[in-house]
Amino acid sequence: MIKRLALHETVDLHEIIAFKNLCLTKTATMSKLAQDEELQAILTADTAAGIRHIERLKEFLTNRGENE
């Protein structure tokens, strides 16, 4: 059985991805400006996690939920 995302789910995913991109941009920018090494490490880790999250969310749009 093929599962498909409803229109409102697709729109919600686009909104979440846009928000995550904004957060990722801010985190990446702030990590370069931070002077504390521990804070830089936290922000760098958050940037890597944000990239993984965005890629996973994009999979839902690309696959249209067919493999879930």
Image: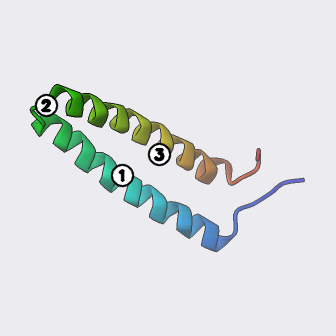
* Rendered position, 62 above or below 33: below
Front position in the image: 22 or 31: 31
Residue 28 falls in which quadrant of the image? top left
Q: Is there CB contact under 8 Å for labels 1 and 2?
A: no
Quarter of the image where one finds residue 22: bottom left
| Closer mark to the observer between disc 2 and disc 3 | 2
Disc marking residue 54 = 3
- Of the residues shown, which amino acid type is indicated by label 2? Asp
CA distance for labels 2 and 3: 27 Å
What residue is rendered at 36% in x and 38% in y? 46
Q: Give percent across and percent down for residue 31.
A: 19, 37
* Residue for badge 2: 36
In this picture, residue 8 sits left or right of residue 32: right
The amino acid type of the residue labelled 3 equals Ile
The answer for how far apart the CA atoms under marks 1 and 2 are is: 24 Å
**Amino acid at pointer 1:** Asn
Q: Which residue is mark 1?
A: 21
Indicate the secondary structure of the residue bearing disc 3: helix
Q: Residue sitting at 69 percent across and 69 percent down?
A: 6
Residue ID at (62%, 50%): 60
Q: Is residue 37 above or below residue 62?
A: above
Considering only order in the chain, which callout, 2 or 1, is on the residue closer to the N terminus? 1
Label 3 neighbour load within 10 Å: few <14, some 14-19, many 20+: some
